[in-house]
Amino acid sequence: EVQLAESGGGLLQPGRSLRLSCTGSGFTFGDYAMSWVRQAPGKGLEWVSFIRGKAYGERPEYAASVRGRVAMSRDDSRSVAYLQMDSLKIEDTAIYYCARGVPAILGYYLDDWGQGTLVTVSS
Amino acid sequence: DIQMTQSPSTLSASVGDTVIITCRASQSISTWLAWYQQKPGKVPKLLIYQASTLQSGVPSRFSGSGSGTEFTLTISSLQPDDFATYYCQQYHSQFLTFGGGTKVEIE
């Protein structure tokens, strides 16, 4: 059974940094892209980033709304994907979901999701 | 980025109804489209990928169709468990985008 577990969320002040982690189990982690999707309170889903698997060069991609402030990485030996977020803004407040990506030509659909971790940015 | 527009944003229906949700892309995405279901306080769940392929374990009353810029999700014989919010997502581009969601409410 595929399982994804996020950690690292919490209450932070604007301008601070945080690192989210996503630990996968039940599948060969390195064979898949991993993605972060967030959901602000009462709002819809917003894709944040993904990182390709080893076969695709482990290259990350980022949404325009966060590009320049976030960096995604992975450690396949530990089955963990990370999202480093800097210069946090109030509008970054959301539940952050980790999801497993199944490849298409350029993008991915997301077939398994973690339970999410809440990030609250407030002064 | 490719914009995804869903309609309606809210839909009221009764158990047993057939429901159709539309998703439009701002440019052609072939059939690189997925649909997700999210219940309140729960994690999104993949229903359909490549516009019309049912994910394993998803009931056959869910179906998807379309290509290019216009897509539909159809729920036949709506069940109490189907009242939820549904999202489309394009993966034609490496910059993934979701539609704004369609909430299916009990009439």
Image (cartoon, grey):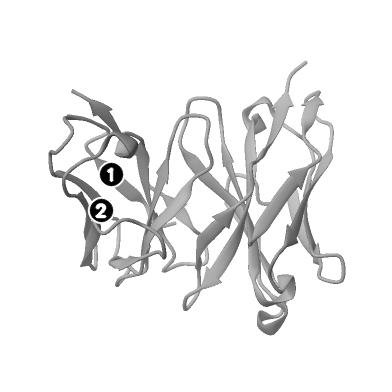
User: Is residue A29 visible in this depiction of the protein?
Assistant: yes
Which of disc 1 and disc 2 is earlier in sequence? 1
C-alpha separation, residue under disc 2 versus residue under disc 1 = 6 Å
Please, which chain is the residue tagged with disc 1 on?
A: B
Q: Is residue B62 above or below residue A33?
A: above
Q: Residues within 10 Å of mark 1 (few under 14, many from 20)?
A: many
* Rendered view: B99 above or below B70: above
- Label for residue A118? none
- Toward the top, the furthest residue is A123
Q: Is residue B7 left or right of residue A105?
A: left
- Kindly check if marks 2 and 1 are in contact, taking CB atoms under 8 A apart as contact: yes
B39 or A103, nearer to the observer = B39
Picture coordinates of residue B12, whole percent (x, y): 19, 28
In percent of width and height, residue A43 lies at: 47, 30
Which residue is under mark 1?
B6
**Category of crowding for the residue at label 2, using alpha-carbon neighbours closer than 10 angstroms: few (below 14), some (14–19), many (at least 20):** many
Chain letter of disc 2?
Answer: B
Q: How many marks?
A: 2
| Residue B35 percent coordinates (x, y) | 36, 54
Which residue is depicted at the point 84% across and 32% down?
A16
Examine the rendered structure and indicate whether residue B67 appears above or below residue A95.
below
Amino acid found under the numbered disc labelled 2: Arg
Q: Are marks 2 and 1 on the same chain?
A: yes
